[in-house]
Amino acid sequence: MLTQRIERALEATLQRSALSSSPPRLTRAIRHAVFPGGARIRPQLCLAVAMACGDDDPHLSDAMAVSLELIHCASLVHDDLPCFDNAALRRGQPSVHAAFGERIAVLAGDGLIVMSFAALAGSRPKHAERLADAIGILEQAVGPARGIVAGQAWECEPKADLVTYQREKTGSLFTAATAGGAASSGADPRSWLGLGDALGEAYQVADDIRDVLLDVQALGKPSHQDETHDRPSAARELGLEGALNHFNGLITRAVGSIPSCRGALRLRGMVLAEAKRLLPDECVSVVRQMSSGALVSGSPSRVGASNA
Amino acid sequence: MLTQRIERALEATLQRSALSSSPPRLTRAIRHAVFPGGARIRPQLCLAVAMACGDDDPHLSDAMAVSLELIHCASLVHDDLPCFDNAALRRGQPSVHAAFGERIAVLAGDGLIVMSFAALAGSRPKHAERLADAIGILEQAVGPARGIVAGQAWECEPKADLVTYQREKTGSLFTAATAGGAASSGADPRSWLGLGDALGEAYQVADDIRDVLLDVQALGKPSHQDETHDRPSAARELGLEGALNHFNGLITRAVGSIPSCRGALRLRGMVLAEAKRLLPDECVSVVRQMSSGALVSGSPSRVGASNA
């Protein structure tokens, strides 16, 4: 199973990081940020593409998957800081800064970024010549030019373009997951950018829709963050039904973008299953009913407002 | 000149990072964190050791020097955050969070960590087989196990051991500078750990002494940070004269630890010159006079308190 492989690889990486000699609160905070995980969607996508491409260097594909998840965890820890979302909850449990304080949260995020690069650099792949590409893919996904750091920094600009913002903040790690999975298996990463790009945007659009639809219990984090922080949101820009149509179009594009390879059929099935997980049927029904007017009178006013 | 080589290499790295496409405030904040620099002591030490060892792969030694300076800048940006030192000044100008806000300061530090690893990974060295060692040295210097992240996190523990704390917070980048300079020139990094270790501790002890002696104008940052934040300080633990004797012993150890190599004599001269820069003669005179009682009545009470 992919999920077991990912959890094992993450655990092995944390063990190798010699965290046992770290300051105890930092160690606990880093573990708290990584375990238990969320859907592990980025490392799953990375390994699924690696396997579709033959997965002939599993040490490297494992390291690529781990590095993406550690960077993702780092970004969540820093996003939750008081100066950004000031979120007390993450994945249904206290956020790192809520549990360990702001200083340890800054350092845990920093440490996770370092561990992410170290996981790749120290992976001792069978095909050592693939390593520089893999690190380059990670760097592009995170860096201040076009990666998640850039995406988050667009929030601090007076004017942000929705597409740029979403591509960098969320999409970059999805693109890195598909490109990195391919590169670690010796395939051309450029052929896999389309899949990551479409899935990353779909993931963000689904999040925007769910943010409007769900309350804090169902989501495991405070809803309406986009509204509170005045962030770009497809659900607000396109309306709920427009956002749903956009989501479906992105999934179709994702499925169509999968290059011909021996694992293509399995991967298509995975993408469609992921689409269902991101926007379950009941969410789709509510959006359709709201659009037809059936739910307007009974819907909470905030949904109407967000949909404006 | 070493300093020109370092500034050129830093500028080239920032250019290559494609910061021109970054969010504008993030770009300005990253430049603000890197230029104008401080003494650039870590990259100078790295290149001095590389040159003492032959410097046969200057792309790699440049990248190693740059990566250490970028990490150092990242750590300053995050150390200055409100939740840590809350320092409004750094190197005599507004700190990054004071100039650009806390959110951009968190992201600039994150971006600098990423750029540091990317500088090494993308350096295209002549001797590619040295790259993994170089990245490993950087990781050890920064990581949550024994690097500067760990050192900073010891501040968040109820009890910190002075030697551990100083070694990790300051010493780790000095050790990485000597080990990294050697590794990038094909020499055995382990033979150079002693020099970095002694110089790193000497640097910290000199900082502790100057913190007690100098006011904010002379230092370019608020003095008495150690006292304010209840940090370990050699000047407080050993007294000013004890700390000065310790400093001199460390410089002697540093000079004696330089392995036999063609650049050894020049490097010894550099270390002694650096010692004078760290603790100028006038500082030494003040300490000696205070110890002999000559300055006790006229000394500000805070010096007496810190020296207790």
Image (spheres, coloured by chain):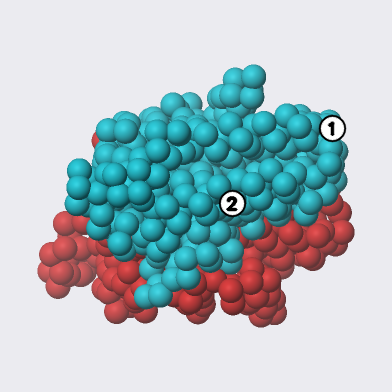
Chain colours: A cyan, B red
Q: Chain of mark 2?
A: A
Quarter placement of the C terminus of chain A: bottom left
Instruction: Indicate left or right for A112 with B218 as reference.
Output: right
Q: Chain of mark 1?
A: A
Mark 1 sits on what residue?
Answer: A262
The residue sitting at 27% across, 38% down in the picture is: A216
Quarter placement of the N terminus of chain A: top right
The answer to whether residue A240 of the structure is visible from this angle is: yes
Secondary-structure class at tag 2: helix
Label for residue A305? none
The residue sitting at 71% across, 53% down in the picture is: A193
Residue type, numbered disc 1: Arg
Instruction: Indicate left or right for A276 with B53 as reference.
Output: left
Between A304 and B114, the one lying in front of the other is: A304
User: Which picture quadrant has residue B7?
Assistant: bottom right
Instruction: Indicate left or right for A24 with B66 as reference.
Output: left
Mark 2 sits on what residue?
Answer: A249
Residues flagged by tags 2 and 1 on a common chain: yes
